[in-house]
Image (spheres, coloured by chain):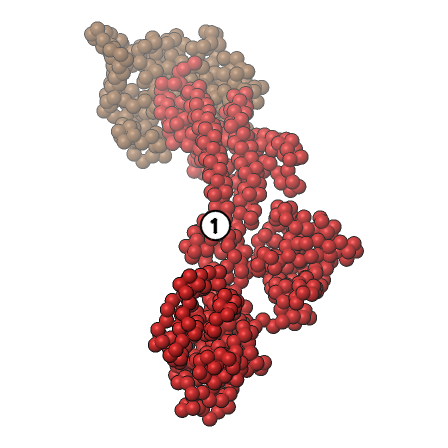
Chain colours: A brown, B red
Amino acid sequence: MAETIAPMVYLKGLVKMRSQCESVFELHVPHFAVSPGQMVAVIGESGCGKSTLLDMLALIMAPTRVDRFEIIFEKLDAPLDIADLWARVDETALSALRRDLFGYVLQTGGLLPFLSVRQNICLPARIKGGEFFMSRIDALAHRLGVSGCLERMPAALSIGQRQRVAILRALAHQPRLVLADEPTAAVDKARARVIMDDMHRLARDEAVAVVVVTHDLELVMDRADIAYTFDTHQVSEHITRSLCRPVIEGPP
Amino acid sequence: MTQPRPLRLIPSLAALHLRHEWILTLCLVISLAAVISPLLVLLGLKYGTIQTLRERLVEDPVFREIRPLQTREFKPEWFKEVSSWPGTGFLTPTILPLSSVISVVRDETGMAELFDLIPTAPGDPLLLENGGIVPEDGAAVLTAEAARSLGVNAGGEVVSRVTRSRGGRMENVEARLHVAAVLDARAGALARVYAPLPFVLDVEAYKEGYAAPARGWAGDTPEPYASFDGAVLLLSEPLPPISRSGLVINTGFGRIADLKPDKAKDLLGFSPPQNIVLYDLISPGASITASNLRAIDQKLRGHTRLLLPYVRDVVVRQGEDTLRLVGLSINEEQARLLGLPQTPWGGYSGTPPEGMLSVLWPSAHAPVEERTTLTSSGLTGLEFDLHTAGETGLEYPVVPMELLGVLRTATQRAVSFNREKGRFEMARGGYRGFRLYAQRIDDVPDLYHRLKGQGIEVIAEVEAIERIQVLDKGLTRLFWLIALLGLFGGTAVLIVSLYAAVERRRRDLGVLRLLGFARRHVFFFPIAQGLMITALGLIAGFGGYGALAAAINHAFASELAAGEVFCVLPWAYVPAFCLVTFVLAALASLVAAWQATCIDPAEVIREQ
């Protein structure tokens, strides 16, 4: 399936170096691709660089070096060269891409505390502009079981409810790619499974690609189309190198 | 699909954020109002109090007045000139202080009071700015004290009585005056009557014994007096040295000098007899009149003497030609002493003789006409007619000495010739003082120095004005200092609070960036908040000001005149104040705005 459809995000030869005090962390991503409708899992322990990879995919962190970094979708004739946008520091174009194509689910939801749940959900669609249907949001809310708390403030929700609202927000403006950063880290295993199922099902129904970052291999392996993981080793006293590679076994 | 306009969402998001943190917002609004309210009250106080004081002091016309210190003559041309000076607001001639006292009687009571009569004219600031109007002829404006002592109000009527003593008899005339207005107490504490200049001039003339025909006041018509430059004294024998040097003392003459016969001919126009002693009595720079001559004559009683006054610089023309005239008025006895025939108009008496406009022509040049028209260049050119009264054996035409004296007076005072009545009349030469007001307080020093430059001694409240200006400047500076302090405080509060808000909401701003806002969009988030807080702060500040101003005005109401308030803001200040505040708020939020753009979403979105 992944081979038959052209990828919508394509990364090749990416290197990101981050230095903190004297220690240097190097992330190498030789090859990474997300195709439309795919669920891609990025699995790794903390500190392996999975959040860094996600931030670069989310266009909020510039790669140090990259051979190819392209975004392709049907409205564009040619692939969009992200590496070039970063080189030109075209912040407006990058934020426009985030606005139009991406949805985000953060670890703790990332809801804005000063907006009501409904305002939070509608915000990406309002930023994107154009028409959006409240009925669709109500339907999605119903499916996620949060329709009762749309008028409440995020602070009044449980963590599980917040995560579901975050998923709803990530999907409300009909993005092409949802980036989820440890969406289940704050909930117990049983609830995590339900949330992951919800996201998987909705992404499939909405034909949206999903990149989910998690440290819980078990949680995603039976749902993901492709999984990536990291090999981390200490090169020297100060340099840590992490290599991102596909998980060989693949999904059953 | 419509164009995405993320910027439009920023204000509503900023407002929702402020509402969410309403306690912090309230604190911020209150702290801004706590700066704005006192500033507004201060501004109101400065404007209200200081402006009231300023108007009371600086705008009081008294402070714009420039008064003459000495009584001297000011010619009509001088008034015309000074009126045209920049900064001159109002100028009217005045009369001698002594001539200006009239008694005013109130009809009902018959009570009479003595008041100063002051001339006024349209535009008089003392009247107009003290609740009065400029009276027309037949009306007058009273000062508060005058109205009080008479017990009249505006709209009432009083009778003015002008008295004079003439020929040992007391005479008086009365004129009804409508009280057009009563001035505020500020206009002066003295009892005064302000009336139009023509009325005042008529009063002055009447007091001096003259008539005011237009008002039916009887009296003389002013006649010019004769004046001379000096006199030639003829004596049969020389004076002893002591008598000689004491002769001129207390006579008005300056000194006495020996006179050579040929010099005497120059002065008199004819040669005096050989066997006579000649002296020249002179008074440099001053005019000699009949009384001076009389004084000398008194001192020489017992001597065989003759005083022949002379004039210089009187230029008389017949047509285009200059005509030398000999002034001679001698009686029979004097004629004998001079060896000349007696003049038909008699000897010099000090008053104009019957045939003052007569002339004796030298037999060689006697004209055919009975009447000759001559001109004399006085202050205003004079044209007069002389009758031929006979012939003379002298070289030049002979006229009465008094005529030459009058012609000399005409070079110093305005004299006109009334052809109908065949006599010279004193024209109004000038005025004895003036009332001058500068347009603005700041014009006073210029006018003051300009008049001083003309040699006119004047007084003006130059120092007081400068003191008030200094006080005003000082208070304005004080206000700006305090305002500056307040502005610093208010701006600092905004800078810190907005900066802190950005720091506190780093994660939320990061999420906003993640959701598709660009740096330049989040830039406006703190600015929008700053402006909103400022708007609320201004509303609260104006509310606080309103309450405080009302309290202050109420508290000081007893100290103030009706219509005066202690604390008031002119409406024009309000938009300016708001604009300045908003500009400052926008500037203050720039730091926070810049800070907001520096947020890196990747660093903050995982913060808890």
Give whichever of B73, B351 is nearer the camera: B351
Instruction: Name the residue carrying label 1.
Output: B444
Would you say B39 lies left or right of B396 here?
Answer: right
Q: Position of residue A27 (x, y in %)?
A: 26, 15
Q: Position of residue B520 (x, y in %)?
A: 38, 32
Q: Residue at x 50, y 46 (%)?
A: B461
Q: Residues within 10 Å of mark 1 (few under 14, many from 20)?
A: many
Q: Residue at x 46, y 60 (%)?
A: B249
Specify the amino acid type for callout 1.
Val
Would you say B117 lies left or right of B107 here?
Answer: left
Vertical side of A169 occupied by A227: above or below: above
Chain of the residue under label 1: B
Give whichever of A221, A186 is nearer the camera: A186
Secondary structure beneath label 1? helix
Vertical side of B147 occupied by B239: above or below: below
Give whichever of B11, B127 is nearer the camera: B127
Note whether residue B70 is visible.
yes
Q: Position of residue B125 (x, y in %)?
A: 57, 53
Note whether residue B214 is visible.
no
Vertical side of A101 occupied by B450: above or below: below
Total marks placed: 1
